[in-house]
Amino acid sequence: MDDHLSSAKMQFDGAAKILGLDKSLVKALLEPKRVLEDDIPVKMDAGGTRHFNAYRVQHNDALGPFKGGIRFHPEVNIDEVKALAMAMTWKCSLLGLPYGGSKGGIVVDSKKVSVHELEEISRGYVRSFAEFIGPFKDIPAPDVYTTPQIMAWMLDEYEYIVKSHAKAAFTGKPVELGGIKIREEATGLGGFFSADAAASRLKMKPASTAVAVQGFGNVGFNAAVFFHKAGYRVVAVSDSKGAIYDESGLDPSSVMKGKAEKGSVSETGKGKKMTNEELLELDVDVLVPAALSNQINAQNAERVKAKLIVELANGPVNANADRILDEKCIVVVPDILANAGGVTASYFEWVQDNYGFFWSYTETLNRLKEMMGSAFERTFSKASEMGITIREASYALAVDRVAKAMVLRGRV
Ligand code: NAD
């Protein structure tokens, strides 16, 4: 079992203990409802056919249709997809969304295939799993290295197969195809709302608060922009090629301009170069891991100096590290709360596509702020009421809602 899955199970076990769940309920909540695997054959531009492994894990649908992104990454594996699908169940539950949880993945390095090959892989994924997808079955969305264009190809292939318009079957689409404007920045923005609320509880003032962000893609970049706009000092950012550090603060938009020209934040000539490992151990106030899972683990947790960690990636702090961080009194806002802005915006997109009626940007923004804010308040109150960590409180709230739905449905 990979680290991410065993960590996800340990976090669930903690909640099951707090809630006093019986064995049969624990088993029913842990096991995915459906695990789908296929290989996607693609005729490559240079000739020949390559087969890409593809997965869809549908973890639990007691609260509603499955919902979860599709990751395009060379290291995707079935255990990781299972862990991510389970996290989606808890995340949707914690936010009060009418969804269960799922996740998908394709083993591919999207930087090493042509645009045409990428389109064929995306359409092939839908052909593999179409019968299990749909607005009221399972609603895929983007994840790491998945773009609105990929969602557009997937939607088109799906509608071709089912011979009907079905925009609400996918979220994270381009605006022209029923996507919503805020989706692009929603995860970063929601993460910023959570971080800002937690920082203010810890009596941090933006101007004197140093923030380091690992990962400078959709989530990390947008979060960095909102921190910067709110007056926080973003002192370090990174991507897969390395990190940069400037004690006086970086302007994320200007770093992004440089990255677009030079290919990496570390080649922009801004700040001092450092490694991703060094970034995680910087003496900052807020650390925002927004790249991959398992970045803070038993090996480096002891050296982490931040006072607040806001998990914008999925599973960046593993369960062993959690204990060490807790002993060091480092506050962790867990992924199922901190990065839920994306799925909440996806929910808004789904609602609007089902209705065929679209809200203004401001209305959507206000609803996002309200939903994230109330989930944050519920979780923090539960944590202080019970004297448990924010992660334990968020899992307890999330698992409890799904457990009740399972019992009411007579599934245990
Ligand atoms: P992305 O593909 O847009 O960006 C990923 C970033 O991480 C890139 O800057 C990449 O260079 C960097 N990266 C890759 N490997 C790295 C490494 N070893 N060290 C440091 N940086 C590395 O992906 P994203 O959409 O920003 O997603 C980032 C994380 O957030 C993922 O864990 C994803 O599951 C999670 N997440 C994303 C969303 C969303 O709406 N996009 C929602 C919830 C959670």
Image (cartoon, rainbow, N blue to C red):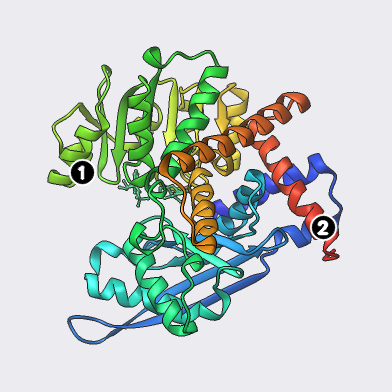
Question: Which of 125 and 282 lies nearest the eye of the viewer?
Answer: 125
Could you tell me residue 273's position as x and y percent? 22, 31
Residue at the front extreme of this rendering:
357
Residue 282 shows in this picture: no
Direction from residue 249 to residue 330 in the image, left or right: right
Q: Nearer the viewer, residue 117 or 162?
A: 162
Question: Helix, strand, or loop for circle 2?
Answer: helix
Q: Left or right: 322 with respect to 42?
A: right
Marks 1 and 2 close (CB-CB < 8 Å): no
Using the image, tell me which numbered label, if any, was put on residue 43: none
Q: Nearer the viewer, residue 108 or 380?
A: 380
Which residue position holds label 1?
Answer: 264
Mark 1 and mark 2 lie on one chain; the one further toward the N terminus is: 2
> Dot 2: within a 10 Å radius of its alpha carbon, few (fewer than 14), some, or many (20 or more) residues?
some
- Which residue is labeled 2 in the image? 25
Quadrant location of the N terminus in the rendered image:
bottom right
Could you tell me the amino acid type at mark 1?
Ser
Q: Ligand 1 within 8 A of label 1's CB?
A: yes
* Residue at x-position 77% and y-position 60%: 27
Gap between marks 1 and 2, in whole Å? 47 Å
Local crowd size for mark 1, using a 10 Å CA cut-off: few (<14), some (14–19), many (≥20): some
* Label 1: element kind: loop
Report x, y in % for residue 127.
Answer: 45, 81
Q: Is residue 345 visible?
A: yes
**Relative to 264, is 78 above or below?**
below
Outermost residue on the bottom side: it is 48
Q: Where, by quadrant of the figure, is residue 412 drawn?
A: bottom right
